[in-house]
Amino acid sequence: MQGISAIDKVECVYTACYCEENVWKLCDQIRQTFPQELEFCLVIFISNERRCISVWNQATAPSSWLPVLWDYHVVLLYCPPTATPLLFDLDSTLPFPCPLDRYLAEALRPGYPSPDPHANLPKSLRLIPAAVFLTTFASDRSHMLASGHYLAPPPAYPCIQSTVSRNNIQEFINMDSGYGIVLPLKEFADLAQARRLQTVVKSAADGRVSSNADECARC
């Protein structure tokens, strides 16, 4: 496969600990260079009610077999109708892009217990069409401030703003009503294994929120 799968990780805009902005920049890169592929791209926010999730094979992990604990994580899914779904994670040590099945098994690991009990609440995924994310997402980076200081150095470019908001990142992190659709990780993985992801793409484009894989699959 050519095109989007040939994007070079080293050429992507990247700032550590600002995964949502990194993915926004990646979507913008796709919009400019492969606009015909944008409709097959979904931005995925991963979190849970506790805002504590384990993700394996991350570059900042203390060792190769331990996960990183994130309050949330953001990645990009490319899901064309007739090709293997690919996952883009700029913080991962897995291939870039990575086949979705491998990323699920080796990075998100549905049903696999975390070594940290605080991170064992099941993960949920918010899936937003990339085109919608580009026109709605906004962040003033205030979530990265503590006592007036940034928890990690911010990107050098200006804050991402939209006509919708100056700061709505919490609407994407929260796993209740909001943009796109929300699915538990296990149900999303079941849909991926059953090769039903096109129904997820359609549901996300329709903005229909569902917490049930069977309902989503019938959309």
Image: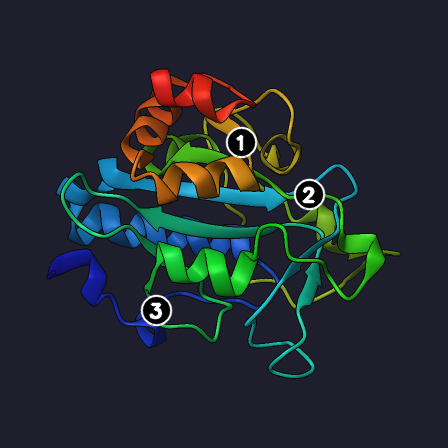
- Provide the residue designation for mark 2: 122
Dot 1 alpha-carbon crowd within 10 angstroms: few under 14, some 14 to 19, many 20 or more: many
- What kind of element bears circle 1? strand
Q: Is residue 217 above or below residue 149?
A: above
Residue toward you, 141 or 78: 78
Q: Is residue 125 above or below residue 208?
A: below
Measured from the top left, where is residue 55 in percent x and y? 61, 61
Q: Nearer the viewer, mark 2 or mark 3?
A: 2
**Residue drawn at point x = 71 percent, y = 52 percent:** 71
Q: Quadrant of the C terminus?
A: top left
- What kind of element bears circle 3? loop
**Residue drawn at point x = 13 percent, y = 58 percent:** 3
- Provide the residue designation for mark 3: 96
Measured from the top left, where is residue 30 in percent x and y? 25, 51
- Provide the residue designation for mark 1: 183
Q: Are marks 3 and 1 in contact (CB under 8 Å)?
A: no
Q: Alpha carbon of mark 3 to alpha carbon of mark 1: how far?
A: 24 Å
**195 left or right, relative to 135:** left
Disc with the residue nearer the chain's start (2 vs 3): 3
- What kind of element bears circle 2? loop
Disc with the residue nearer the chain's start (3 vs 1): 3
Disc with the residue nearer the chain's start (1 vs 2): 2
Q: Amino acid at mark 3?
A: Phe
